[in-house]
Image (cartoon, rainbow, N blue to C red):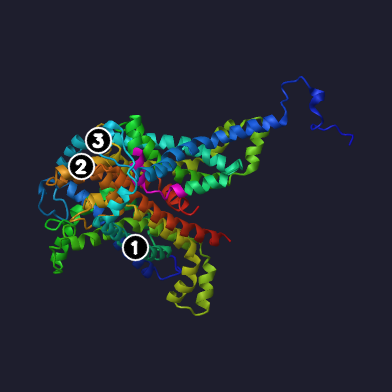
Amino acid sequence: MTTSTVTAPPSAAAGKPAAPDPARARRRRRLAQWGFVAPAVVFMLLFFGYPLVRNVVMSFQHYTPKTFFTGEAPFNGVDNWSSVFRDALFGKALWHTLVFTAGSLLGQFCIGLALAVFFNRRFPLGGVLRSLILLPWLVPMVVSGIVWRRILDQDTGVLNAFLDTLGLGGGTPWLTSPGMALLSVILVNIWIGIPFNMVILYGGLQEIPKELYEAASLDGASAWRAFRSVTLPMLKPVITVVLVLGFMSTVKILDLILALTDGGPADATQTLGTLTYQNSFVELDFGAGAVVGNVLILISAVFAVFYLRANRTEGK
Amino acid sequence: MAAHAPTAPRRRWGSTVAGLLVLAVMLFPLYWMLNTALQPDSGLLQVDPVPSGLDLSGFTKALTDQGGNLLTSLLVSVGAVAICLAIAAPAAYGLARFGLRGSRTMVFGTLITQMVPGIVIANALYTSYVDLGLVNSYAGLMLADASLGIPFSIVLMRSFMVSIPGEVIEAAEIDGAGPVRVFLRVVLPMSRNALITSGLFAFLFAWSDFMFALTLNTTDDVKPITLGIYQYIGAHVGDWGAVMAAAVLSAVPAAILLVLAQKYIAAGITGGSVK
């Protein structure tokens, strides 16, 4: 009671500007703190928020090459939507996207997991070999695509030459026949995705306490049984993350397909990503491109919700 | 000799052999890229499994044709890294420490942005870039490429900065340092590893970018190597030696980074995904 505190009425020290009132000081502090976050917020709004909104608006506008000179893009209702949906190419691209995504994820994940389990054992040079496997992941995707285009060439590619010497045929039109092209593109994408899957799953494996395996082996569990009853359940959160991130990066893929096939032959590898690109930047019909782009966002959003729900139950 | 190895040594070396085989299969395309680059004359013919000699004419041609594009890539990537770190580092610190209203929403929003397809962004950005005069400009491409690294860097650096002990920061504040000073003198030096990892990935993202390079440029003024190689195969299908030499050159930064900064790369791949 008798001790004089700093919170005593400031009137005593009135007239001294060096002691600003605490409310004002706090507000200035808050403002300074917002200054740290504000540039990022502005940037994200401009480069992510705005394009999302703009794409929805654009999908109801009529764009032609002329638009870029006149600046006029009249609204045309649902014309873009109905013409895109009526086009058989859209259905094809949607189907290719689903097959491509599912096939890539399945292959990347299974091989990535197998390699993670393999490298989780200790053996000489294990660490060096494991980090060298990362190399393909660091090369620009469009470059990987071009290298594979050379390898898969029907007449002069090394893969067919190799299969030929093994007596397994050869002469397979990997990228040039409509029946094979999608499968080939999926195989290349599996190759690209293996390092990423392996590294994340390996990290997850490292977190599993060794005692669990000792306990399992004391109980007489086989290696396969230990994998099913210890590894997989303990790895579940990491598996979710890998699959969701894999989905997000696969469903929108563009670089790889353009480098390998340009969407051909006969649209056999056209996906929602390449179709968006083709509509907007080849045909210069940005309205139609925006429609396909919005469908792509919608698919991603459904998956994002799924991911966040899985994350929430994980956190509890 | 180590007599009490946990497993029989022979079996452990067996795993090494198996590991080498896996590596050989995984890295074969990269080997083939180098091999083809060293045999420019083979053109449309099949390539020998091993180059018979070091023919560097493919590299000479690639450097003549694509050297400028390599420099463009370097310039754009470094610029993108600078923008990315300048924006992401303060934001990560702000989100980690200040407890501002809406912080959670912002972190959530950052995660969401990583799910937006790039082609959708390019679609909307292009029309605005035309209006703003940013098409075919270094600044425009740097900004777009920075967007590839910013959400990732915010998430990564934030999770690192959360773990900086509060006492250190409070001690600096008691010494009279304002928030900017605390950030520059205390937080940034302590976050060195997170900054390096973020910068490294921002660089890799920008260096690998093909989509923004393809869509936000209509002339040859600003042409990164990824776009250069893509157009190369259109024009020089017969000259695979030069195309592959250009591909090798474009992969060099990745190889250097992997050797020099292995631990940061592993940290970035896991840290950026499992928040």
Q: Is residue B216 visible?
A: yes
Q: In the rendering, at what x and y percent does residue A126 appear? A: 39, 60
Depth check: give the residue in front, B141 or B232: B141
SS of the residue under disc 1: helix
Residue pointed to by mark 2: B231
Dot 2 and dot 3 residues touching (CB under 8 Å): no
Quadrant position of residue B140: top left
**Image mark 2: chain:** B
Q: In the rendering, at what x and y percent does residue B42 appear? A: 10, 49
> Which residue is depicted at the point 37% across and 50% down?
A294
Residue pointed to by mark 3: A66
User: Is the residue A70 above or below the residue B243 in the image?
Assistant: above
Type of amino acid under label 2 = Gln
Type of amino acid under label 1 = Ala
Badges 1 and 2, same chain: no
The residue segment tinted magenta is B112-125
Q: In the rendering, at what x and y percent does residue A298 appear? A: 40, 54
User: Is the residue B184 above or below the residue B156 in the image?
Assistant: above
Badges 3 and 1, same chain: yes
The residues tagged by marks 2 and 3 sit, at their Cα atoms, a distance apart of 26 Å
Residue pointed to by mark 1: A102
Determine whether, in the image, residue A95 is placed left or right of residue B58: right
> Which residue is depicted at the point 79% across and 33% down?
A7
The residues tagged by marks 3 and 1 sit, at their Cα atoms, a distance apart of 39 Å
